[in-house]
């Protein structure tokens, strides 16, 4: 009779995500993933028959659900200013770590790009489109609204790089506050 799982699927995802975030797809070895979950390699294969690729997909799906909840869904509000500011607050909740790291960014390096790149590009395109719609509702012309959406995401992603270098969440928090303040001024 099989032994019951010691970790739920959500707990497994929460255990493996930091490994993929910090080491990328190629650097997330089965040894590191096994250590992070306290499961043997055989047990990991029981949960993820296709191995590391399944684990990466599960980590991305779990993160995608959180991204949808905290960042994308708020952008669907009718009030554009409230939509963007609520989404910015959601980014702080989404990256609620002492040193925030973007899983999507980590999984687009090396072999991970071929495995997960299309899905990640699709998610980013949705994010850009939702932001573009919100900026359009604020009165920006379509091209300018798209440029603003892309610039906002680039600022956030850039701040995440600085967070890693400075080992602090402060750059992200400063960026979010700057974005929110610029919305109020405009």
Image (cartoon, rainbow, N blue to C red):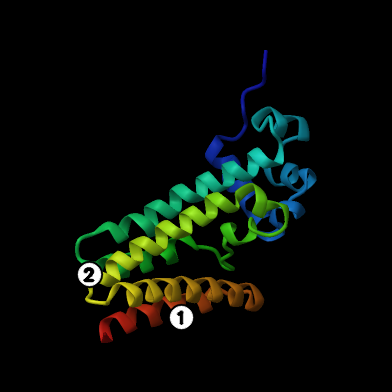
Task: Give the percent coordinates (x, y) of residue 34.
Answer: 74, 41
Report the side of 136 relative to 38 (left or right): left
The reply to whether residue 38 is visible in this rendering is no
Tag 1 secondary structure: helix
Q: State the residue lying farthest toward the left.
A: 79
Q: Disc 2 vs disc 1: which is toward the camera? A: 2
Are the residues flagged by discs 2 and 1 in contact, CB closer than 8 Å? no
Q: Nearer the viewer, residue 110 or 94?
A: 110
Q: Nearer the viewer, residue 155 or 177?
A: 155
Which image quarter holds the C terminus? bottom left
Tag 2 secondary structure: helix
Decide: is 101 above or below 168.
Answer: above
Task: Give the percent coordinates (x, y) of residue 102.
Answer: 57, 62
Report the side of 131 relative to 174 (left or right): left
Among the 4 quarters of the image, the one containing residue 44: top right
Among the 4 quarters of the image, the one containing residue 163: bottom right
Task: Give the percent coordinates (x, y) of residue 95.
Answer: 50, 63
Label of residue 137 in the image: 2
Mark 2 Cα shell of 10 Å, populated few (<14), some (14-19), many (≥20): some
Report the side of 4 relative to 143 (left or right): right
């Amino acid at each position: 009779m099989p032994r019951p799982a010691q970790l739920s699927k959500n707990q497994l995802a929460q255990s493996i995500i930091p490994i993929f975030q910090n080491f990328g797809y190629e650097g997330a070895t089965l040894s590191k993933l096994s250590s992070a979950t306290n499961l043997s390699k055989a047990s990991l294969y029981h949960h993820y028959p296709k191995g590391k690729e399944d684990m990466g997909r599960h980590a991305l799906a779990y993160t995608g659900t959180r991204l949808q909840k905290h960042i994308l869904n708020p952008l669907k509000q009718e009030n554009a200013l409230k939509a963007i500011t609520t989404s910015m607050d959601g980014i702080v909740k989404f990256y609620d770590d002492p040193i925030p790291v973007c899983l999507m960014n980590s999984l687009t390096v090396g072999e991970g790009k071929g495995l997960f790149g299309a899905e990640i590009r699709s998610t980013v395109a949705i994010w850009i489109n939702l932001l573009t719609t919100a900026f359009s509702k604020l009165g920006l012309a379509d091209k300018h609204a798209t440029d603003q959406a892309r610039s906002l995401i680039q600022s956030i992603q850039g701040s995440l790089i600085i967070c890693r270098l400075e080992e602090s969440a402060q750059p992200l928090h400063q960026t979010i506050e700057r974005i929110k303040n610029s919305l109020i001024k405009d």
